């Protein structure tokens, strides 16, 4: 019965964020808030994730999440983000003719949202809080699957982006289970978004040869290597990480005591 109770709580928490997003959307619609499509979506995500983080603030465990910011952590995060980008970008661009893609212009608000709010709040709401709360109470594969589906739901524009987001969520959830380092996840998410923004703003506009590279055998080889590296990262416990990247034992004990 206790196991069933934990499962029900887990699925309830997983469903809470989409419910909060829906309620935020309805609220903004009821108030007839005049915003652009981007601003509307941004505001609903800000409201929903902020409420979610406040409700479960005890499960954030700030000391554990932010204890390991270092040069080494930052370098590891950038490498993983770049490898993730290679594979996820390949999946997202499968149905597109890249020769017709034009550079994207981002406003200051959009850059702040993609490079600051999104990495922090999506990692807290989609992974850190949920995994901290239910780790060792339900199987890790359920945690990984559930949080990955939640993350993919937030990126459900099309099946390719959904698949890409699910894969990214899977890798990051596995990493968090291994390292217990939320700072690493936030940095990976930040660098991933930074690479995407740079690609959309610059590469597609000023470097047509980069676009042509997407259609060469070398690119597919790189994607294959990236996929294999991500499998290794996801399924082989990364003991090569510095001890500072791992969570101190007290965090798990504290989680059990608080819940």
Image: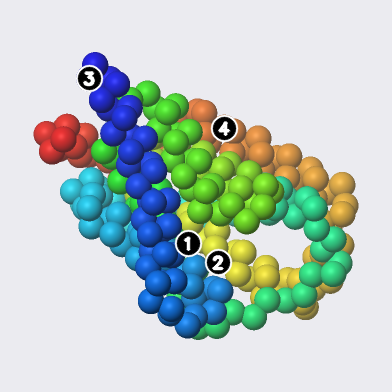
Image location (x, y in percent) of residue 155 = 56, 54
Image location (x, y in percent) of residue 226 = 66, 43
Q: Give the spatial CA distance, label 2 vs label 4.
A: 24 Å
Q: Are there few (<14), some (14-19), or many (20+) residues within 10 Å of tag 3?
A: few
Of badges 4 and 3, the one in the foreground is 3
Image location (x, y in percent) of residue 199 = 67, 68
Q: Are there few (<14), some (14-19), or many (20+) residues within 10 Å of tag 1?
A: many
Q: Earlier in the sequence, mark 2 or mark 4?
A: 2
165 on left or right of 160: left
Q: Determine which quarter of the picture holds residue 186.
A: bottom left
Residue to which mark 4 is pinned = 232
Q: Residue at x 55, y 66 (%)?
A: 194
Q: Earlier in the sequence, mark 1 or mark 4?
A: 1
* Image marks 2 and 1: residues in contact by CB distance under 8 Å: yes
Question: Secondary structure under badge 1?
Answer: helix
Q: Give the spatial CA distance, label 3 vs label 2.
A: 43 Å
Q: Give the spatial CA distance, label 4 vs label 3.
A: 34 Å
Q: Earlier in the sequence, mark 3 or mark 2?
A: 3
Q: Residue at x 87, y 54 (%)?
A: 215
The colour scheme applied to this rendered structure is: rainbow
Residue to which mark 1 is pinned = 190
């Amino acid at each position: 019965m206790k196991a069933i109770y934990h499962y029900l709580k887990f699925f309830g928490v997983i469903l809470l964020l989409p419910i909060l997003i829906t309620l935020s959307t309805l609220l903004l619609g009821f108030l007839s808030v005049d915003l652009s499509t981007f601003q509307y979506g941004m505001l609903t995500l800000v409201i929903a994730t902020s409420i979610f983080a406040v409700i479960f603030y005890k499960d954030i465990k700030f000391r554990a999440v932010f204890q390991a910011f270092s040069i080494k952590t930052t370098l590891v995060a950038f490498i993983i983000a770049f490898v993730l980008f290679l594979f996820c970008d390949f999946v997202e661009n499968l149905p597109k003719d890249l020769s017709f893609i034009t550079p994207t212009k981002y406003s200051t608000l959009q850059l702040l949202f993609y490079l600051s709010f999104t990495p922090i709040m999506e990692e807290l709401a989609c992974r850190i809080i949920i995994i901290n709360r239910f780790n060792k109470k339900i199987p890790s594969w359920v945690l990984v699957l559930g949080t990955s589906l939640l993350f993919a739901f937030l990126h459900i524009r099309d099946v390719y982006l959904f698949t890409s987001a699910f894969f990214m969520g899977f890798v990051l959830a596995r990493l968090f289970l291994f390292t217990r380092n939320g700072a690493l996840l936030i940095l990976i998410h930040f660098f991933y978004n930074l690479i995407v923004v740079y690609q959309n703003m610059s590469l597609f506009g000023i470097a047509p040869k980069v676009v042509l590279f997407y259609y060469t055998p070398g690119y597919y080889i790189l994607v294959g290597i990236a996929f294999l590296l991500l499998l290794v990262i996801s399924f082989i416990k990364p003991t090569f990480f510095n001890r500072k990247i791992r969570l101190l034992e007290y965090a798990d004990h504290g989680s059990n005591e608080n819940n």
